[in-house]
Amino acid sequence: MRDQPVTEHQDRQEETAGLRRPLGVRSGDGSPVPAVEGVPQERRKPREAIFELGDVQVSYGPKPAVRGVTFEIGKNEITALIGPSGCGKSTLIRCLNRMNDLIPTAKVEGQVLYHGQNLYAKEVDAVEVRKRIGMVFQKPNPFPKSIFDNIAFGPRVLGMKGSMDEIVERALTHAALWDEVKDRLKTNAFGMSGGQQQRLCIARCLAVEPDVILMDEPCSALDPISTGKIEDLMMDLKREYSIVIVTHNMQQAARVSDKTAFFTVELDDEEHRSGRVIEFDDTDKIFTNPSDSRTEAYVTGKVG
Amino acid sequence: MSAHSQAIARASGSRRAKDFAFRLGMFLCLGLAIGLLGLLLVDVARDGAGRLTWDFVTSFTSIDTDQAGIQAALWGTIWLMGVCAVFIVPVGVATAIYLEEYADDTKWWNRLIEVNIQNLAAVPSIVYGILGLAFLVRGPLSLGPVILAGGLTLGLLVLPVVIISAREAIRAVPPSIREGSMALGATQWQTIRRQVLPAAIPGIATGVILSLARAIGETAPLIVIGAATVVAFNPTSVNDAFTAMPIQIFDWITRPSNDTNNYAPLAAAGILLLMILLLLMNSVAIWLRNRYEQKW
């Protein structure tokens, strides 16, 4: 797998590994986080890192589903995770808010730092984590309740103070859905279109005032018009939130994201598939001048 | 005729005949099942319809068959069903929630519990009667042959069915709903209490009603625990002795009829009343399912 030409960046990175601590990268015991090949560290200087991933590996059972994930997710940025099916993008995004806890066999190794705090430390409560790190899923999953109750559910269970009417209106306005639904707040959310349902799910997530929004292929079940609305919404939301999005749609990643991580699938000797990050960089660079030939082949459509 | 039109022409005679024969065979089986039931109903209705009056519902049983009614047994049955429901709903739903939402299937004790519940659903009702007699009527609880003991015995009898149907209702709530709720920072209990259970209630209620419909016709366990046959008062508490409709019907059937006393129409009228109650309960279950069932 190391047959591609070594770039200048990699050279420099290897020289300095362990000597220089790149901005924001730290680990609990002070040891340097292992560098990833093909990731020029000079380029990734987020203003402030929300997540710092250090050699993260997630397994379901004995074999890893995704491994060797090292990159940072910056504040008020949209970070896209792209790559072929089965490369572990969804697995990785689900370990950022500990949704993988719900799968008994899932095991997360390596470092997942959230504002410098290890998300998988013993004293961390997964429920508290999910309050701050919201998630929007692939298929819109409104609750079988009214539009109002869908939004109000989160604030209610979290015991948020204030007028529920205001909370609901604010969340729906924020998700650019208020004008479409303000006259039918009491009707069942199942009566909405797919695109509206997905924006309702985003609004539901905004209502609990998270810090980060994780989106796992949020537009894969939607038509291009609904997709466009959600992309506009994401551009709007990144002023206040940090967003991580998994997408199969490369144009979408190119359109909306600031940083892109390219994942690929590797087969080991026993034919076990596991995902791996090949390249993480500014989205512009990934799509116009990628460092790795595999990234280039994927983003230009030669493979995948 | 071209080769193509020949190829798509009607299937050959023998294939069509087979197709028809199977359809006919299955229809006849259906006809046999429904026909026998219909015959039974017509027979009972002919014997009992004339006797099924308001007086029959509001009179106590009597040696004079012209005066006899089913009031005590009707109220006994209503009380029994009440005790049974109060027992099976919380216990059955809690068990189903544990097995569906919390239990780790890979642990042997949880698998043992599951297999046992499946098996318990198939245990003959008289065995539950013996259990009720040994543990509720006599033995550790020594409640005596009262409504509480009868209701609990019937509850034990239908509990496995309630658990199984409640589990199915809970399982029908898609995992995406649980994920959506947990992703908002709800705890597992909040997710169950506010998302899973409300969505599963129509299915659970349907299962409970169908279970009660099974319990209402049970005779053997009640006879074993010592339910009375001739009762001329309505129960006023769970600690009263009681009779129930199937027991009253059984008692009437076993009595010899003569010129002055004819018990057969009484029994038939009792059966009709029981059938009407059953049909009502099943109708409510169907209505509940159609009205409130969540389409995902």
Image (cartoon, coloured by chain):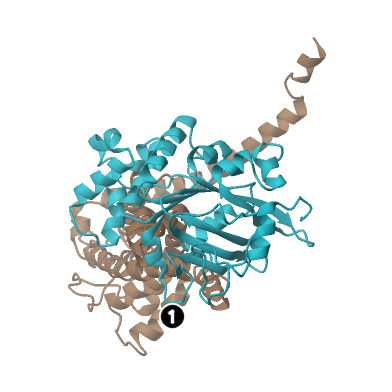
Label tally: 1
Q: Which amino acid, by three-letter code, is at mark 1? A: Ile
For this rendering, which residue is in front, B71 or A236?
Answer: A236
Residue at the spot of label 1: B130
- Looking at the image, which residue is at 37% across and 90% down? B139
Q: Quadrant of residue A22?
A: bottom right
Residue B34 makes an appearance in the image = yes
**B95 shown above or below A142:** below
Q: Give left or right: position of B69 versus A203.
A: left
Residue A263 horizontal side relative to residue B262, left or right = right
In this rendering, position of residue B140 left or right of residue A107: left
Q: Residue at x 18, y 71 (%)?
A: B233
Q: Chain of mark 1?
A: B
Q: Is residue B257 above or below residue B282?
A: below
Kindly identify the residue that appears in the image at 32 percent across and 78 percent down. B149
Camera-side residue of A184 and A229: A229
Q: Secondary structure at mark 1?
A: helix
Image coordinates for residue B234, horizontal then vertical, percent:
19, 69
Residue B283 in view: no
Residue B201, quarter of the rendered image:
bottom left
Q: Position of residue A78 (x, y in %)?
A: 46, 47
Farthest right residue?
B3
Rendered location of residue B21, percent (x, y)? 68, 35
Q: Residues within 10 Å of mark 1 (few under 14, many from 20)?
A: some
Q: Colour of chain B?
A: brown
Determine the colour of chain A: cyan
